[in-house]
Amino acid sequence: MPRASPDRRSLDLADRDDLRRAAGDWRTCVDIRTAKTADRPADALLIRPDAHIAWAAAVDEPTDNAAPALREALGRWFGAAEARA
């Protein structure tokens, strides 16, 4: 499997398997890293190559809201999931 570019990252701050699965179709574009912090600002972040935050899941944001929003942001930055399959 091709490795994601080091400048295309998603940071999982809450160990959310649901959001990692939601990003699965973009696994060749996004390098997902899980990190722990005592006072997390969000559950997950999509970080653009210029280090700006392209998307964030609020702390404890429900999957029904966070997963579709993540897929929309990934599609906007990297193209439709169908094109990646």
Image (cartoon, rainbow, N blue to C red):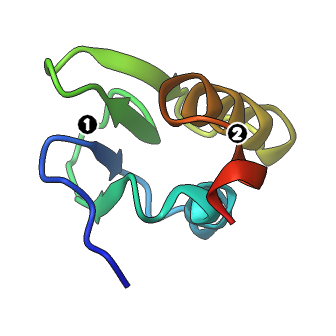
Q: Earlier in the sequence, mark 1 or mark 2?
A: 1
Identify the image quadrant of the N terminus: bottom left
Q: Nearer the viewer, residue 41 or 83?
A: 83
Task: Determine the residue positioned at 33% across, 27% down.
Answer: 41
Is 20 located above or below residue 40 in the figure?
below
Q: Nearer the viewer, residue 46 or 66?
A: 46
Amino acid type for the residue under numbered disc 1: Asp
Coordinates of residue 69 in the picture (x, y in percent): 71, 28
Residue at image mark 2: 80
Q: Quadrant of residue 21?
A: bottom right
Residues at discs 1 and 2 in contact (Cβ within 8 Å): no
Task: Determine the residue positioned at 42% across, 31% down.
Answer: 42
Disc 2 element: loop
Q: Looking at the image, which residue sits at the far bottom?
A: 1
Q: How many marks?
A: 2
- For residue 72, the mark is none
Is 71 located above or below residue 69 in the figure?
below
Q: Quadrant of residue 58?
A: top right
- Is 4 positioned to the left or the right of 79 in the image? left
Q: Dot 2: within a 10 Å radius of its alpha carbon, few (fewer than 14), some, or many (20 or more) residues?
A: some
Residue at image mark 1: 39
Q: Nearer the viewer, residue 29 or 22?
A: 29
Coordinates of residue 33 in the picture (x, y in percent): 27, 61
Amino acid type for the residue under numbered disc 2: Ala
Is 1 located above or below residue 4 in the figure?
below
Disc 1 element: loop
Task: Determine the residue positioned at 55% across, 63% down.
Answer: 20
Give the spatial CA distance, label 1 vs label 2.
33 Å
Q: Nearer the viewer, residue 36 or 7?
A: 7
